[in-house]
Image (tube, coloured by chain):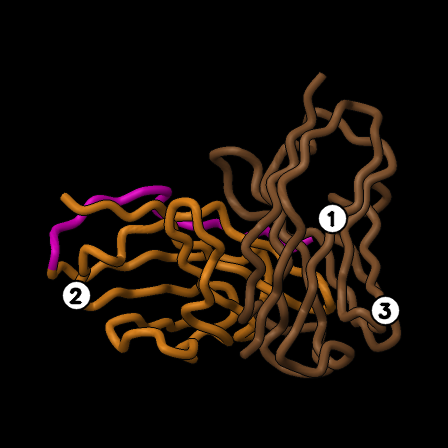
Chain colours: A brown, B orange
Amino acid sequence: EVQLVQSGAEVKKPGESLKISCKGSGYRFNNYWIGWVRQMPGKGLEWMGIIYPGDSDTRYSPSFQGHVTISADKSITTAYLQWRTLKASDTAMYYCARGIAPNSGNSPFEYWGQGTLVTVSS
Amino acid sequence: DIQMTQSPSSLSASVGDRVTITCQASEDISNYLNWYQQKPGKAPKLLIYDASNLGTGVPSRFSGTGSGTDFSLSISSLQPEDIATYYCEQYDNFLGTFGGGTKVEIK
């Protein structure tokens, strides 16, 4: 069974750093692109970026380039989303999701994690 | 960047009604268009991919059509469990964009 299990909710202060995780299981982790999607409170879905764990090829939406870092550790089948300096506007639910087809970056998200709620408040 | 315009932003319909949601891309995206359903407090679920292919386990009352810039998602007979927000998504050249969403309610 394919599963993506995300790390737990976080409460941080502005200016702090954060790294959240998404552990994949039940499939060949190296061979499927994993993406990250933001959902701010009461708002719609925003496509952030994707990573291919096999070679760490990473692509970002222009809206998020430079603000977050996406990475993966294939040895522990885990993808990450990282901030160096959090802002209050980063408060949101963050989902990881896996592409439907192996080796294809242009692929709809078939499997989703349960989401990680990040709250940034002073 | 490719922009996706979804309409309506919300709708209210009766059980058994046919419901149609549209999504327009700012440029030709061929058939690289997906539809997701999101229920409150839950992660999105893939309904339709590549414009017209039904996702795994998705009821046949859901269907998708379109190509190029104009796409639609239809529910042939609205059921109470279809109450959710629906999003279109385009993906091309390793970059995706979601539409603004359509909230579907029961009248």
The region drawn magenta spans B1-15
Amino acid under label 1? Ile
Tag 2 near tag 3, CB within 8 Å: no
**Which label belongs to residue A57?**
3
| Of labels 1 and 2, the one closer to you | 1
Residues at badges 3 and 1 in contact (C-beta under 8 Å)?
no
Q: Residue B51: x, y in percent?
A: 46, 73
Q: Amino acid at mark 3?
A: Asp
Q: Is residue B89 left or right of residue A88?
A: left
Q: Nearer the viewer, residue A88 or B9?
A: A88
Identify the residue at image location x=67%, y=69%: A24
Q: Which mark is drawn over residue B77?
A: 2
A102 in relation to A80, above or below: below
- Residue at image coords 40%, 58%: B37
> At 18% from the left edge and 47% from the top edge, which residue is drawn?
B106
The reply to whether discs 1 and 2 touch (Cβ–Cβ < 8 Å) is: no
Residue A20: numbered disc: 1
Q: Is the C terminus of chain A in the top left, top right, bottom left or bottom right quadrant?
A: top right
What's the mark number on residue A63? none
Res A15 quadrant in image: top right
- Report in which chain the residue with disc 1 lies: A
- For the residues carrying marks 3 and 1, which lies nearer the camera in this image? 1
Q: Residue furthest top?
A: A122
Residue B47 shown in magenta? no
Residue located 27% across and 77% down the image: B60
Q: Secondary structure at mark 3?
A: strand
Letter of the chain that mark 2 sits on in the rendering: B
Distance, label 3 to label 1, CA atoms, is 19 Å
Q: What is the x, y in percent for residue A39?
A: 57, 43
